[in-house]
Image (cartoon, rainbow, N blue to C red):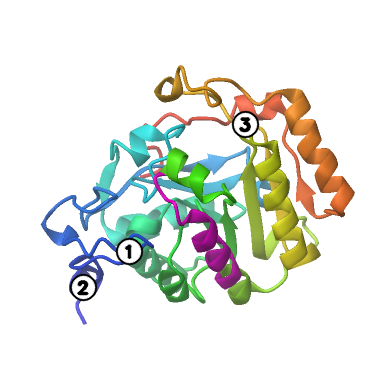
């Protein structure tokens, strides 16, 4: 089957994400994500500020895709997620970007918010592996994923790194226009874990397969953070890693918001970390404010693509 035709079949009546818009993306940007069937990305580079088992010595080979199926009102990458900024690429262009990152000694290929382009990603990984790609492929996700689409990624993705943003449907609706986020994310993470099994760290300190769930603490949401950590630890124990992040930065879009207009207070973050320790989370990562400041928003300069 012709590769372009094969890819377009998925975009003609798109149901790749949980919103299942059924939009015909082959005719242009439509549906909730506003992305067409043309692959778009903004950067492919060595990212030095991921979790230690992902970054390694030389950096994570990170590819930032355009578009998103969430519309978080506090988004730090809104040029990509909301405004669709990016460069149109072919599937081969994407595969070659993976190989170039491997040549630069990337620890892995880190696909950031690729949900809108899953068919392209599958083909690009297959093409790159046929041409010598051997490092792990990581799917870096908001957590708002369709189980059906994740099943398409089985055998393609070695490491999953989803967010778990909310446990409250009300908060999810207000902040990300996705009332069903909590249940969708739970099912998505379960599928990710079913594919990879328990996390495996190699002798070099790098993750080879498994799941890291990220949770970014939000201002005024300590109780919700605790519920998320409790759920993850009760469900997966030490078979996954949990990354507890404090990098939330108020963007102009939330100026004046009663909670989101301020940073997370040190005391709030410490309460979350104390709770994680109390319930026995051992395989986890924390984040310092200094490290976060340098990793917020890359320059969208088309590096590497």
Q: Which residue is mark 1?
A: 120
Q: Which residue appears at 63% of the width and 37% of the height?
A: 49
Q: Residue furthest left?
A: 27
Highlighted range, magenta: 177-191
Which one is closest to the eye, mark 3 or mark 1?
A: 3
Q: Are marks 2 and 1 in contact (CB under 8 Å)?
A: no
Q: Which residue appears at 64% of the width and 30% of the height?
A: 220
Whole-Å distance between the Cαs marked 3 and 1?
31 Å
Q: Which residue is mark 3?
A: 247
Of the pair 32 and 95, the residue shown nearer to us: 32
Q: Is residue 223 visible?
A: yes
186 falls in the magenta region: yes
Disc 3 element: loop
The correct choice, above or below, for 70 with respect to 72 in the image is below
The correct choice, above or below, for 69 with respect to 125 in the image is above
Q: What's the mark number on residue 9? A: 2
Q: Which residue appears at 76% of the width and 59% of the height?
A: 233
Disc 2 element: helix
Q: Looking at the rendering, in which quadrant would you find the N terminus?
A: bottom left
Q: Is residue 135 visible?
A: no
């Amino acid at each position: 089957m012709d590769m372009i035709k094969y890819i377009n079949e998925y975009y003609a009546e798109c149901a790749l994400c949980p919103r299942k818009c059924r939009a015909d993306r082959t005719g242009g940007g439509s549906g909730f994500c506003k992305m067409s069937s043309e692959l778009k990305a903004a950067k492919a580079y060595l990212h030095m500020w991921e979790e230690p088992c992902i970054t390694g010595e030389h950096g994570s080979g990170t590819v930032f895709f355009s578009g998103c199926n969430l519309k978080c009102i506090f988004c730090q990458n809104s040029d990509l997620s909301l405004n669709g900024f990016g460069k149109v690429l072919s599937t081969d262009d994407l595969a070659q970007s993976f190989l170039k990152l491997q040549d630069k000694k990337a620890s892995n290929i880190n696909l950031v918010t690729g949900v809108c382009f899953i068919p392209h990603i599958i083909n690009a990984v297959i093409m790159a592996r046929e041409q010598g790609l051997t490092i792990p492929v990581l799917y870096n996700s908001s957590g708002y994923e369709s189980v059906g689409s994740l099943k398409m990624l089985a055998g393609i993705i070695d490491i999953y790194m989803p967010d778990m943003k909310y446990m409250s449907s009300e908060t999810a609706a207000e902040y990300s226009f996705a009332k069903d986020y909590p249940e969708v994310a739970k099912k998505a993470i379960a599928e990710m874990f079913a594919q990879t099994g328990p996390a495996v760290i190699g002798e070099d300190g790098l993750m080879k397969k498994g799941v890291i769930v990220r949770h970014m603490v939000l201002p005024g949401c300590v109780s919700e953070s605790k519920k998320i950590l409790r759920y993850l630890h009760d469900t997966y124990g030490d078979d996954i890693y949990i990354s507890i992040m404090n990098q939330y930065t108020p963007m102009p879009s939330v100026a004046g918001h009663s909670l989101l207009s301020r940073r997370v207070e040190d005391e709030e973050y410490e309460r979350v970390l104390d709770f994680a320790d109390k319930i026995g989370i051992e395989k986890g990562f924390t984040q310092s404010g200094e490290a976060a400041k340098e990793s917020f928003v890359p320059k969208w300069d088309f590096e590497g693509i």
